[in-house]
Amino acid sequence: MMIGGMAATDIAERFGTPVYVTDEQALRDNFRRIHQAFNRHMETRVHYACKANSNMAILKVLEQEGACIDAVSLGEVLTCLKVGYSPDRILYTGVNVSNEEFEGLVEAKVPINIDSFSGLRRLAAISTDVPISFRVTPGVGSGHHQKVITGAKGSKFGIPIEEIMDAFREAVDLGFKPRGLHAHIGSGGQSVDPFTDLVGILLGVVNDLKDELGLELEFLDMGGGIGIPYRPNEPVMDVDELAANLTEMIMEESDIKTLAVEPGRYVVCDSTVLLTRCVDIKRTEEKNFIGVDAGFNTLIRPSFYDSYHHVAIANKFNKACEARYDVVGPICESGDYLARDRVLPEPEEGDLVAVYDAGAYGFVMSSQYNSRPRCREVLVNDGEAELIRDSEDLEDIWRHQVMPQRLM
Ligand SMILES: Cc1ncc(COP(=O)(O)O)c(C=O)c1O
């Protein structure tokens, strides 16, 4: 198994396991593909949703590609500024935003996407001299799991569509100059239709704003959520068709000149593999287990969302698959697994298991559960591998804990 021109086994040997390995060229290719798909039709800002993977080296690669950023916390904003993004390339879209966070955003001069009337009023009390847009709850939802559908009615995100005109009206009365309209239907959907429905709804609002308030918006932001095929035979969403359909609707039905899209998963997911070592093999009457050194502390998606990640034994690509195995980790919970019922070659202790499509919502959702330090991340480019995050050690786990003197 080769990653970016290097053998997976060599990478694992050099950096240890578990380790997230990102192929820089794949990352650049993904960004360029989606950027071109939209920009060939109309000016489109591709705001990479950095919650998917906020490693600073990855942010820097995308900065070099001309990405903008979708940030959901002040921490993400300040990280992106540190990496070299200018404030105008960042759009902050938070939910349940505290006054302290608003103050930090105003100081950072970053455009803010407002999510509630409360947020609008609290921000106005801090400053109206900040570019704003609104996140609407469009009533259209889509996603790979109930937990990541955000645009449906009843969602905690955004201002309900029925109230969005009032929100813009109040913003203008408060002294803001609202510039855009945003929605995000959810994450990881595989169908084009919800995006078409969404844009239809957003265009209705854009035109109502013009007719009723005389407000001409600068941009429309259709959020992220473009799914990727996690299973070997799953169809790939046709991003060219998506871009052609949506941009045509926007150009025909409105005066909007700039579109924004916020892909996270699409940009980073398949650029990264998690390499984990087989440490234990267990055969029982009911099941066979390949025990590896990564658990849901390292990659939580299978346990948390029942997500499928394709797995292979990296040092046995040429061996026939013979039996079914669950690939399970070292966490003391029976819900700790990376893959279930997979047909794989006969495993041995020391084999290297590759978990595919681990670049989105992988490392960023990892934890120190069971007092296990977080693992390394490596970037591979043109046959060279570089460390982009060192592993933690026990000192990192102990660092912020305080033992009261009276217990000593
Ligand atoms: C507002 C917003 N934009 C973009 C995204 C990125 O979604 P995805 O990684 O599915 O493209 C998310 C994900 O939760 C989001 O909440």
Image (cartoon, rainbow, N blue to C red):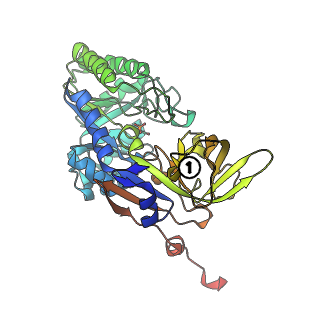
Q: Quadrant of ligand 1?
A: top left
Count of labels in the image: 1
What residue sits 66% from the left and 83% below the top?
407
The correct choice, above or below, for 158 with respect to 10 in the image is: above
Q: State whether residue 278 appears in this view.
A: yes
Element at label 1? loop
Reading the image, the residue beneath label 1 is 300
Viewer-nearest residue: 221 or 332 = 332
Pinpoint residue 334: horizontal percent, then vertical percent. 71, 51
Pinpoint residue 317: horizontal percent, then vertical percent. 50, 46
Viewer-nearest residue: 121 or 406 = 406
Viewer-nearest residue: 27 or 290 = 290
Left/right of residue 236 with respect to residue 154 in the rendered view: left
- Image quadrant occupied by the C terminus: bottom right
Viewer-nearest residue: 85 or 343 = 343
Residue 260 lies in what quarter of the image? top left
Left/right of residue 44 with respect to residue 340 in the rendered view: left
- Three-letter amino acid code at the position of disc 1: Ile
Pinpoint residue 285: horizontal percent, then vertical percent. 81, 46
Residue 38 lies in what quarter of the image? top left
What residue sits 53% from the left and 58% below the top?
367
Pinpoint residue 55: horizontal percent, then vertical percent. 36, 55
Left/right of residue 132 with respect to residue 257 in the rendered view: right
Residue positioned most to the right: 285
The correct choice, above or below, for 337 with respect to 350 in the image is: above
